[in-house]
Amino acid sequence: MEGRMVDNTNIWIATLDDEEMLCEILSNEFTKAGYVALAYSNDKRDFLEMMPVLMPDIIITDLSSPGMNGLEFIRNVRTNPLYDNIAVIVVTGHNSPELRMEAKRLGVYEFICKPLDLNYLFLLIEQIASRLNVQ
């Protein structure tokens, strides 16, 4: 992106993971990079109810969590046309080809296995942010 300024301050990133510490670490890193960050470690059903108000640009979610699991959450997001432009990145400890394929079928931007490579995650976020800043 030579010679082009990207404005991160308008990009909202929501991190949904039952590991509260991971949510906080990622949220802090995103904030330091100039993004608007939200960490959420509770039931994804509650987050779904708040989505019409929050409208994140990017959602980073795990797959296993109490209450609604990640795939069910993604299905709910993808069935609502209001959320068509939200990029979803899965970060999970489950490296299963079946889960990866199902997530990709549901339209996730990327499926990343833990341990998390923060540099790679930021590369993905920068790609998404560039696309959003062009629109």
Image (tube, rainbow, N blue to C red):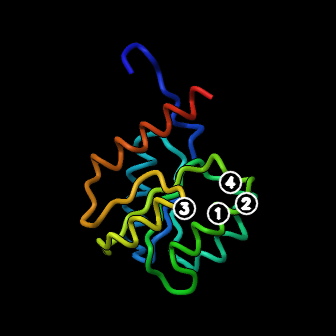
Question: At 47% from the left edge and 21% from the top edge, which residue is drawn?
Answer: 5
| CB within 8 Å, label 2 to label 1 | yes
Q: Going by the picture, which residue comes out furthest to the top?
A: 3
Task: Identify which amino acid the numbered label 4 is placed on.
Answer: Tyr
* Residue hosting label 4: 83
* Residue hosting label 1: 77
As drawn, is 116 to the left or to the right of 2? Answer: left
Estimate the x, y position of residue 64 in percent, counting from the top left.
44, 79
* Residue hosting label 2: 80
Query: Circle 4 — which element?
Result: helix
| CB within 8 Å, label 4 to label 2 | yes
Task: Identify which amino acid the numbered label 2 is placed on.
Answer: Asn
| CB within 8 Å, label 3 to label 4 | no
Q: In this view, does 64 lie above or below 81?
A: below
Question: At 43% from the left edge and 49% from the top edge, which residue is drawn?
Answer: 30
Question: At 37% from the left edge and 61% from the top edge, which residue is drawn?
Answer: 25
Q: Is residue 125 above or below residue 5?
A: below
| CB within 8 Å, label 1 to label 3 | no
Task: Identify which amino acid the numbered label 1 is placed on.
Answer: Val
Please rate how many residues cluster around mark 2, counting C-alpha atoms within 10 Å: few if below 14, some from 14 to 19, many from 20.
few
Estimate the x, y position of residue 134 in percent, counting from the top left.
57, 26
